[in-house]
Image: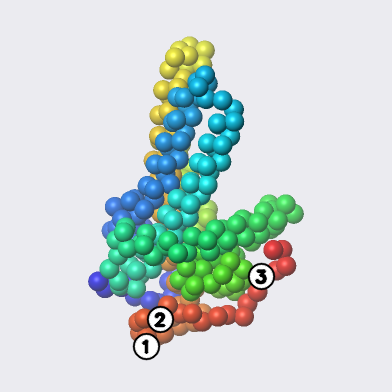
Amino acid sequence: MTGLDLRPLSLGEILDRTFTLYRRNFLLFMGIAAIPAILQLAVNLSLLFFRGSQATNFTTLILGGLVTLVVFMVAYLISQGATIFAVTDLYLGRDTSIGKALDRVWGNIPNLFGVTLLNGMAVLVAALALVIPGIYVACRLLVCVPAALIEDRGPRDSLSRSWELTRDFAGRAFVIFLLVFALSAGLGALLSAPFSVLTVLAINNNPEMVRTWTALSQVGSTIANLLMTPIMLIATSVYYFDLRVRKEGFDLQFMLDPTSEGHTRSQGSIPSIL
C-alpha cells in the first residue's frame, strides 16, 4: 500500500486530503464510528419507549444511566483512537482494517481517557474566562490525541506537544472546527430537524405519534453524527502530520527510518491553566 506524500500542505489541501481519505475508505471509518453511535441510539430509543414503565424504578434508571455512560465513554474512546490509528496507517502506507485499528487501541484506553479529560478541563477553564479564550485553547490543543497515540505520550505531555505544534497555526485549527461544525449543523438539520418539527406539531394534534417522530429524529441525528465524526478525526490527524512535516521534516525522518513514528520530544509547554 502506497502512503501519501509527506509535504507541507495548504489549508485547502488539508481539507481535500481529509475528504479524499474519507471517501476512499468510507466503510472502514463508518465501521469504526458505528461502535458508539449505535450504542447511543440503542440507549436513547430504550429510554424513549420504556420510560415510565412500572417495572423501572428511579434507582434502576440512575444505575443504568451510570453504567451506560461508562460503556459509552469507553466505546467513544475506542472509536476515536481506532480512527486515528487507521488514518496513520493509511497516511504512512500501511495495510489497515477495522480489526487492526481496534486491536491497536485497546492498551491506550486509560491514556486516551486522561488526554480527553485533561483537554476538556483546559478548554472549560479557558471558556469560563470568556468564549474566545476557550476557542483559542481548543484550537491549540486540537492535535493532543494524535500526539498521545502516535508518539506514545502521557496526558499532560500530549497537551504540551499539541500546544507547541500548533504555535502560529491555530487559525487552521479554527477553520477545521468551523467547517466541521457547519457541516454537522447542516446535516443534522437535514436528517433530524424535520422530525423534531413533526414531534412538536404532534404534541397537540396527534399525541400517539410523538414517540415515533422523536425516535425518527434520534435516528436522523445518529446518522448525522455517524457521518460527521470521522471527518473531524481524519482532519485532526492530517493536520497533525502536516504540522510535523512543517516543523520537524517528518518526511525525511520517515524515509530514513520507516519504523519510526517520530518520538521526538519537544520542549514546548502549555499555560498554567491545567
Q: Is residue 184 above or below residue 204?
A: below
As drawn, the residue found furthest toward the left would be 1
Question: Dot 3: what SS?
Answer: loop
Nearer to us in this view, 46 or 261 = 46
Closest to the camera, between mark 2 and mark 3, is 2
Residue at the spot of label 2: 260
- The amino acid type found where label 2 is placed reads Ser
Which disc is residue 270 wearing?
3
Residue with the most extreme right position: 129
Query: Does the residue at mark 2 contact the one at mark 1 (Cβ under 8 Å)?
Result: yes
Q: CA distance from mark 1 to mark 3?
A: 31 Å
What residue lies at 37% left-to-right and 88% top-to-bottom? 256
> In which quarter of the view is residue 88 placed?
bottom left
- Indicate the quadrant containing the C terminus: top left, top right, bottom left or bottom right: bottom right
| Distance in Å between CA atoms under marks 2 and 1 | 9 Å
Query: Label 1 belongs to which residue?
Result: 256
